[in-house]
């Protein structure tokens, strides 16, 4: 069984559907027995939706978009 920290580390990939079937099943099992992680999952989903909706309504300057993409790409490389 996975622990809460592992669950939170995989949360974004879980929501994006990027995990393999075993990892997704392990997270589903964890969520069944862990109300704090379910609460965090629901908060994360809501926050993500609000951010996406806000970004659709606001023009983000191209230089900011570029810097954000560079930061995200760097974080992905550091994880892997």
Image: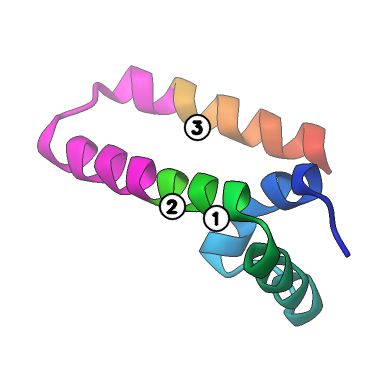
Dominant SS type (magenta): helix
- Residue 71: image quadrant is top right
Looking at the image, is 32 positioned above or below residue 7? below
Q: Nearer the viewer, mark 1 or mark 3?
A: 1
Taking the magenta stretch, the answer to whether it contains residue 51 is yes
Looking at the image, is 13 positioned above or below residue 24? above
Please give left or right for residue 66 compared with residue 75 in the image.
Answer: left
Q: Residue at 69%, 64% (x, y): give it.
A: 33
Q: Which mark is residue 80?
A: none
Q: CA distance from mark 1 to mark 2?
A: 6 Å
- Residue 66: image quadrant is top left
Q: For numbered disc 2, what is the local secondary structure?
A: helix
Residue where numbered disc 3 is placed? 69
Question: Nearest the camera: 51 or 61?
Answer: 51
Q: CA distance from mark 3 to mark 2?
A: 25 Å
Q: Nearer the viewer, mark 3 or mark 2?
A: 2
| Residues drawn in magenta | 46-66
Q: Position of residue 42 (x, y in %)?
A: 43, 52
Q: Position of residue 2 (x, y in %)?
A: 85, 58
Q: Crowding near pointer 1: few (<14 within 10 Å), some, many (20+)?
A: some
Q: CA distance from mark 1 to mark 3?
A: 29 Å
Q: For numbered disc 1, what is the local secondary structure?
A: helix
Please give left or right for residue 66 compared with residue 35 in the image.
Answer: left
Q: Dividing the image into 4 quarters, which one contains the N terminus?
A: bottom right
Question: Nearest the camera: 3 or 66?
Answer: 3
Q: Which mark is residue 38?
A: 1
Residue where numbered disc 2 is placed? 42
| Name of the residue lying farthest toward the left | 57
Q: Residue at 20%, 45% (x, y): give it.
A: 53
Q: Position of residue 25 (x, y in %)?
A: 73, 77
């Amino acid at each position: 069984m996975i622990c809460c920290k592992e669950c939170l580390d995989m949360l974004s990939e879980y929501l994006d559907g990027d995990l393999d079937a075993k990892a997704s099943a392990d997270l589903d099992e964890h969520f069944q027995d862990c109300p704090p992680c379910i609460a965090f999952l629901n908060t994360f989903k809501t926050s993500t939706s609000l951010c996406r909706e806000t970004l659709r309504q606001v023009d983000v300057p191209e230089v900011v978009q570029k810097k954000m993409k560079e930061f995200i790409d760097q974080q992905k490389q550091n994880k892997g």
